[in-house]
Amino acid sequence: MLDDEDLEVDSPSGEEESEEEPQPEPFYDPLIEPWNDPASTSVLEYRLSRRSAELTAARPVVGPRSADPQAEELSELRRRLRAETVVIPEKRRMWSVTVREVAETLLLALLIFLAVRTSMQNFRVEGASMEPSLQDGEYLIVNKLAYAQLDLDLIDWLPFFSAGDDSVHHLWSSPGRGDVVVFRSPTNVNRDFIKRIIGVHGDVVEIDPAGGGVIVNGQKIEERYVRGDTRCSSSCGPWVVPEDAYFVMGDNRQNSSDSRQGWFVPEENIIGKALITYWHDNSPNLGLAPNHDVSLAEEAAAEE
């Protein structure tokens, strides 16, 4: 008889011995297992090879492929970064842009200055000839385009257009009685005067020696803005105002050198019409220039 230990157990017929199931790969943790561990290195290489195979199978083949999938993935990343990168100008380019902007700013400032200087100009009143309307030392701005003129002979070449005998016209208005104007002195063009227009082209101006008033075209005008009586020294007129000229007087009639001395102001000598005053008694004082309408009695009655 055989002992129990010596009994041989035969496997059932037709059944094959079951194969041993593969064990799962151990989880690799770089914090526990160092990178230089042989086992860890083998596991890392195995996983990298599987990742490369997956990328190769998932990516369509377009032309020749690099032997290293990681290099291709890095190249793709660089391409995306390059496409989304903001290019910073070079230092030389930045300096050129700065110089251009500064030049444009200076040019614009120059154009604005020339435009303002062409249309406006400031003056300082010297003397007491325009008191009480304007005081000595008062500053004002003069509109140099108030009496701008246009010569129609420049466009006389147009068909169905004729400039006529009087081809020069004022764009806005012509100098009128009561306007305070700055002009170059007819006796000394290097000096600028400021006076009030009393007579225009064709007017006959004279001084009433008895009443001390101004008579224009036979009618005495009322002037509420004057200081003192209007007197005459050598001659009291009458003066006939010539074409393109004006008879001017200061508001301070007893202390003014004006057309009562026998001279007139050519229109070409007029610099502009007083617009506003902005400095008075050593302090800012903004106000309109003392322009007053001086009309004759007949003209006032016709308007009514």
Image (spheres, rainbow, N blue to C red):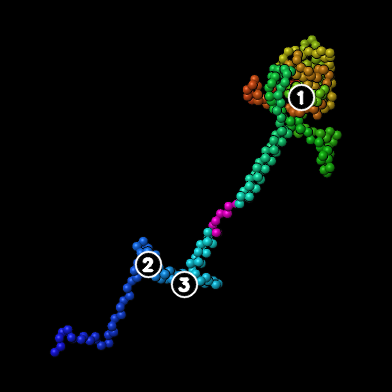
- Mark-to-mark CA distance, 2 and 1: 103 Å
Q: Disc 2 or 1, which lies upstream in sequence?
A: 2
Kindly report which numbered mark, 3 or 2, lies closer to the viewer in this rendering: 2
Residue 92 x %, y %: 63, 50
Q: Which of 240 and 129 is in front in this view?
A: 129
Q: Which of 254 and 162 is in front in this view?
A: 254
Residue 50 x %, y %: 42, 71
Q: Disc 3 or 2, which lies upstream in sequence?
A: 2
Q: What stretch is highlighted in magenta?
A: 82-89
Report the amino acid beneath label 2: Asp
Q: Nearer the viewer, residue 200 or 262?
A: 262
**Image quadrant occupied by the C terminus:** top right
Q: Is the magenta stretch mostly helix, strand or loop?
A: loop
In the figure, is residue 280 to the left or right of 206? Answer: left
In the figure, is residue 272 to the left or right of 240? Answer: left
Report the amino acid beneath label 3: Ala
Image height of 216 relative to 122, above or below:
above
Kindly report which numbered mark, 2 or 1, lies closer to the viewer in this rendering: 2
Label 3 crowd (10 A; few <14 / some 14-19 / many >=20): few
Report the amino acid beneath label 1: Asp
Q: Disc 1 or 3, which lies upstream in sequence?
A: 3
Asked whether disc 2 touches disc 1, contact meaning CB atoms under 8 Å apart, the reply is no
Residue tagged 1 = 192
Residue at (56% x, 54% y) in the render: 86
Residue 294 x %, y %: 74, 21
Q: Which mark is residue 37?
A: 2
Q: Which mark is residue 57?
A: 3
